[in-house]
Amino acid sequence: MKAGDVTIRIPRLANVCPPGSPSLRLALVVLSIGAASHFLLFLDSVVDNLLPAAMPFFLSVYRNKEDAEMAWEVMISSRIYGLAAGCLISMLISQKSGRKIPVVIGTILDVIGIALTLLTTYVPSGVIFAIFGRFINGVGQGIVQTVGSAMLAELPPLKKRGTALASLTMWACVGELGGMFISLDDILGKPATWQLAMGVPLLFLIPALYILLKAPESPRYLYLTNREFEARKAMSYYQNPSDGKQSLEEIMGEAQILLKDKCIDENGNASKVEKSEKFVLKTIVQRLKDGQFSRPLIIALFVQSFVHLDDWLWISYSTHIFENNGLSAGKAQRASLLMSLPQAIISVALLGFFDNFRRRTLLIIPTMFSVAFGAVAIFFTSFSSASPFGIPTALILPILAALDLSVAAISGESAYAIVPELFLPNDKVLGTAMVGITQNIFGGLLTNFLLTAVNKIGTAKVLVPFVMMNAIYVLFTYNFLPETGEKTPQEVARNFSNDMPGLDSLSLLNL
């Protein structure tokens, strides 16, 4: 056998894991990854309702209301910038650390960040602690969100991967609803307790951290790093024997393809291209030259960054918007809570049927409805108190926002399932990280200016570009997004040529 030859053996799946149901163990790990990532949108929705309760504290720290509101905006957006940083860090550590270790590290950072925010009103310069804590929490979520998405695309059998990935959006909707509820003035949304509302996710993060510490590494990662016994044990932990056999065949097929692409010379030495992949920047440049990475990356950037832009507005500032349109502070808080309830119910219910529908259908049709709901919202918010039909804007706007978020729950589940599925297995972390960085920098910029924009130009004018972008989103995804449901990464990759898209705009669109 030559030095460069690699022998691949398909190991027998033995019962080498603790007794119990593989489906239950898999479900607990899937739910834990969701709790440590997308459930933390709780921290974005909770600050929406907390603004009235927190304002007395901020006014005691800053000289005027304008400075206090600016500090509040910075505190909110710091977590989103942390998310972008976490996505970047995940690219640096995942290649050498696999899947489990980054996910555990990210969850620990989640806990540390929340603990720091709890100190806001108890220590000098507490606002700085809150800003830094939310940033650290964002870093943790960014790591778990990026590496965890890749892990969720590897742990379940092929027929259940869509549901596992869609569970992330379910957690996001539940987190948003929980944040709206906890921050009510009847619960923790009071001047004396508002900072405690930001600590509630710890109740979920501590059990999730324990489960993730006990869970094994991704079987795929173990197989491809020649840790056969550990891989066999991990496969038995997550899947029953019949599903495990099918997943193993898929992994072995992928391993054969990787060997062909490894560029091993006649002396068994890897080429300079392979060796340079140890350096992340060179790896990124090298992968961008490959059309089977750069082409799905362009689509993924658009699909996830622009999916239902209205979310940034409704989730972060709905209470403030409802107050501006005629509701009292208490009624605006309750309206925000009721607004989030339907999307949470829909996102949970959809998990049972998610893999029965095409991904494209669940992405495009709900976004078309969102365009319609947004257009109606623009019409009603163009009037100060009541529309020409005599319907009060304060009454109709929360209903339209609830309908808008309900269809967002469906399109969001599809988008978060599609993005990891667009990439080849070795590109999943890099691809989802680059998408996450872009999405969160974009979201951070939006949330930095949305409150000011709503106050200065009004809700209607803020909604106009969002609705226009949703319409463009429908056209783009209909024309360029391939179907990824129940397809292996290699099957999806056949939709993309190996040639890198040209630099001119026409070539970029010729995907």
Image (cartoon, helix red, strand yellow):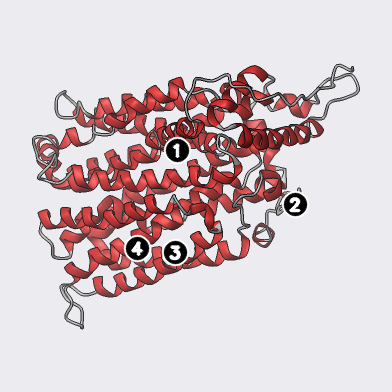
Looking at marks 4 and 3 on the same chain, the residue that comes earlier in the sequence is marked by 3
Looking at marks 1 and 4 on the same chain, the residue that comes earlier in the sequence is marked by 1
186 relative to 48 in the view: left or right: left
Residue 475 image position (x, y, % from top left) = 55, 67
Residue 497: give its label. Answer: 2
Disc 1 from disc 4: Cα separation = 26 Å
Disc 2 from disc 3: Cα separation = 30 Å
Residue 94 image position (x, y, % from top left) = 56, 27
Secondary structure, mark 2, is loop
Q: Split into 4 quadrants, where in the image is the N terminus?
A: top right
Looking at marks 2 and 4 on the same chain, the residue that comes earlier in the sequence is marked by 4
The residue that mark 1 highlights is: 84
Q: Are marks 2 and 3 in contact (CB under 8 Å)?
A: no
Looking at marks 1 and 2 on the same chain, the residue that comes earlier in the sequence is marked by 1
Disc 1 from disc 2: Cα separation = 29 Å
Camera-side residue of 249 and 428:
249
Residue 404: give its label. Answer: 4
Disc 4 from disc 3: Cα separation = 9 Å
